[in-house]
Amino acid sequence: MRQRSLISITAALAAGALTLTACGSRDDSGKKDGDSSSGTTVTIGVDAPLTGDLSAMGLGIKNSADLAAKNANKQGYVKGITFKIEALDDQGQSAPGQQNATKFVADKNVVGVVGPLNSSVAVSMQKVFEAANLVEVSPANTGPALTQGPDWATKKVRQFKSYFRTATTDAIQGPYAAQYVFNTAKKKKVFVIDDKKTYGAGLAGTFTTEFKKLGGQVVGTEHINPDTKDYASVATKVKTSGADVVYYGGEYPQAGPLSKQIKAAGANIPLVGGDGIKDDKFISLAGATGNGDIATSVGAPVEELPSAKKFVEDYKTAGYTDGYSAYGGYSYDSAWAIIEAVKKVVDDNGGKLPDDARAKIVAAMQNVSFDGVTGKVSFDEFGDATNKQLTVYSVTAGAWKTVTSGTYNGG
């Protein structure tokens, strides 16, 4: 026990007024025992890669969720409730993600979790949260099976009632990219590469299906090991295949060096990827030859959305060291969705958090609807975002530039 706690207990005993409230003990709903007048502090967990190759995106997720909690507190948005953020590092890996999920469940003050970044990590966390009736809202997961089941292409079945996301899925993102590459960029021969992970392989698969449907030719496929940065042999295969474009399913730490090595091998063709490569670090890793590379990403550019103007200003004013990155707006909206659900549950319970708050928050989340940073935020019957907008970006003069925004035109 900390020295401070011992001093507090000693003083209370001397005064003859020792109560559990003095030590901050809480019941399962997050309320301080015996104290309904001073308000309740609840925790929104954040799971993301806070260290390692993907930390640029992970820190943006953490900071944006933190900003949402601070704004809610500043506004007194949920009367009697104070929100705080507890962020855990999953390092972009499934095992730490599952351990983090268990920690969040064990902390009875946690009423919801924002994250994770990676779809493969989400797979390891979902059962833990479902069993505990703890809501999870991801700002970045795009794997369709997470919400619609392994046979989503032919039969959609919701997997977990506690899982939601504010980002659209690769069932839309992959085909959207294929349509842009084939119809607009006029590329007809693609070499498809993925990192064998849930996100990368799934995205490459949906892109490939649509590209073939449009009449495009897949002239080669390859899987890479994401733990290495030497892709010389793959680059040579791309060069000899005659491809006029490469599609990569994976993330920027591998996509950047892959792009650079493909060009070095003599294949002066664009590398195209999904939201996982749309980060400024991709540009530095790809080098000067990365100009012309393309990424799709969920939603519209935050900087160009009127609804995001205050978020951008508030983020800057808050003085976070790291940028909000690709998922900042979606992370803010994910945290705010949890705040909205908490508000509904508290309002329905006479201004207090009920003992079964977690289960009630899961139920309330299904009907959450508000105008967020990224536009209208609400969820369909699978827990998927109803906002299906996507954007194409191209590396131009060493920076990501918006090319076009829209929605997938197809089945």
Image (cartoon, helix red, strand yellow):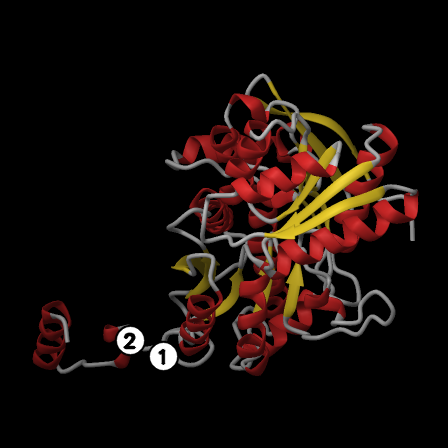
Seen at 44% across and 81% down, the residue is 28
Q: Nearer the viewer, residue 314 or 230?
A: 230
Label 1, secondary structure: give it: loop
Decide which of tag 2 and tag 1 comes sooner along the chain. Answer: 2
Looking at the figure, which quarter contains the N terminus?
A: bottom left
> Which quadrant of the figure has residue 278?
top right
In the rendered structure, the answer to whether residue 126 lies left or right of residue 297 reads left
Residue 33, numbered circle: 1
> Which quadrant of the figure has residue 100?
bottom left
Seen at 42% across and 57% down, the residue is 91
Seen in the picture, residue 55 relative to 44 is either above or below; the reply is above
Q: Which residue is mark 2?
A: 21
Seen at 68% across and 74% down, the residue is 161
The x, y position of residue 199, in whole percent, is 63, 56
Three-letter amino acid code at the position of disc 2: Thr
In the rendered structure, the answer to whether residue 291 lies left or right of residue 410 reads left
